Image (cartoon, rainbow, N blue to C red):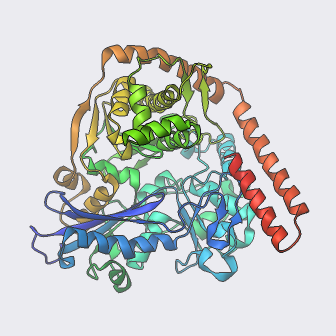
Amino acid sequence: MVDVDASKALVVGVDFGTLSGRAVVVRVADGAELGSAVHEYPHAVMDRELTADAGQPLPPDWALQAPGDYVEVLQHAVPAALAAAGANPADVIGIGTDFTACTMVPTTADGTPLCELDRFRARPHAYVKLWKHHAAQGQADRINALARERGERWLGRYGGFISSEWEFAKGLQILEEDPEVYAAMDHWVEAADWIVWQLTGRYVRNACTAGYKGIYQDGQYPDEEFLAALNPAFAGFVTDKVAHEIGQLGHQAGTLTAEAAGWTGLPEGIAVAVGNVDAHVTAPAANAVDPGQMVAIMGTSTCHVMNGSDVVEVPGMCGVVRGGIVEGYWGYEAGQSGVGDIFAWYVANQVPGEYTAEAERRGIGPHELLTEKAAAQEVGEHGLVALDWHSGNRSVLVDHELSGLVVGLTLATRPEDVYRALLEATAFGTRTIVEAFNAAGVPVTELVVAGGLLKNTFLMQLYADVTRLPLSTIVSSQGPALGSAIHAAVAAGAYRDVRAAARAMGRRTVAAYTPDEDAALRYDALYAEYTRLHDHFGRGGNDVMRRLRRIRREALAARAGADRGAAGSGAATGRAADEVERATEAVR
């Protein structure tokens, strides 16, 4: 540890989310959160148009970001958090960061993002591909098919599927759709590692994303023969674009540079922890790093992580990685691509004006109103069952071509009925994941929940009833940022390892919700129907969802082509672009 009074020692954790970055100042001795601040990304998520370049329309299933937004978080949120805490920057001994994943940045050799070069500013493939960029599904399908055909041993470590969200599928998409950008890309960098590079001047890959998102198992990546079989020009992807020094979680990636000290207001030379992922870094913040404790970070999506003493291949999991959560254990990951964003979509698009007016009259939000009305029902009263695949399925089917479904609608169905069915569907999705782990020999004994959806107490009880597990809750309202701060404390030498730091700095309320047996029995009947639909559309050979996706893409392409043909120059071109954007928005 640097020469600081141990009782005064502080660390900073920075959580880079989907729409904003949050910094928190934490006391090393006990994990007390002294101050925090948030900075929203100016460009947010670019999924309809490339707002960083005059509104250029984007195809369906794209999700991009501007990396300069991340640096702004360091420049604004960190100093603001220090001020909110009334902290003396000289007492800060380390900084840790976490990121959404798999979020990828194409860079030059010195780490400059390609989108910041004038010649690539208008090229979408030069920008950050956010975790929910699903336009590489075709490439992912080919990777999976070839891996099965060749019997690649690493495929089982990922439940039998590689996701379109991950490094290799997204990298192959760039090669095949914009070879010039691919050729100019010296490094294909996880954003979790890129931000640490900006803080330290050193590029270190973190063991978490390398293992879960980069197909790095037992000390190696997929070989060149496999990559060449996908595309001959892809043969050197690992050696030329991906492979780099790998740092273990909780270790020091480097020290804060003078430039980064100027951005943040922190002392030059303090420890900077190896980068991490928002979900995985949350487990220590909840002091939930023992085998059997599954941590579900519930927000727009849900990521499920847990440790195990041994390696077991769980069908449909996102991955199992040695040291993927903490050193010394095998870290398991699964997830749901859509949860909170499904609820948000429903409220934004499907709720009648009279409900909105009632919520306004009562001074509550529409989610609160719908939850209140839904909670007044008996289990099964709505007569519905839904599939929570509005953003595809991450586990256990690993298929982003799947889509949402509600069965049982009648002319008597009310908004709160569908809302409750969607809440239940996400709980059924989590139970599906839990049962897959149990069946594979990785028992789940406690469900620990973190994230923004914790505030919905009805939803939490619903999850306990559906999963039949005691549901514990993280104490901190900003788990990822606290988890990053815990890693910073370890990197600075304040604790011997992450587990020790978690015991001192992390907290959870044990069994905050316990299953109600009567409700659980009735949910069992609904879950059986969910499972039948899940297997019919996800495994049973019924490809209607995938066919509808294809029809949608073809219609959008035809519309865009017609608009381009009708458009002239100047104002006419602008009108055509607007029409394409409106057509795209209409089907999203």
**In front of the other: 587 or 429:** 587
In terms of depth relative to the viewer, which is nearer, 457 or 308?
457
Give residue 48's position: percent from left, percent from top: 66, 58
Is residue 30 among the parts visible in the rendering? Answer: yes
Which quadrant is the N terminus positioned in? bottom left
Q: Is residue 486 above or below residue 113?
A: above
On screen, residue 325 above or below 435: below
- Look at 21% across and 36% down and name the residue there: 510
Residue at x 69%, y 73% (from the top left corner)? 122
Where is residue 572 drawn, in percent x and y?
Answer: 84, 68
Question: Where does residue 586 sit, x and y in percent of width and height?
Answer: 70, 47
- Looking at the rendering, which quadrant does residue 293 occupy? top left
Please give the name of the residue rendered at 30% of the width and 75% of the height, measured from the top-left corner.
Answer: 79
In the image, residue 209 above or below residue 296: below
Image position, residue 220 (x, y; %): 52, 57
Q: Residue at x 70, y 34 (%)?
A: 545
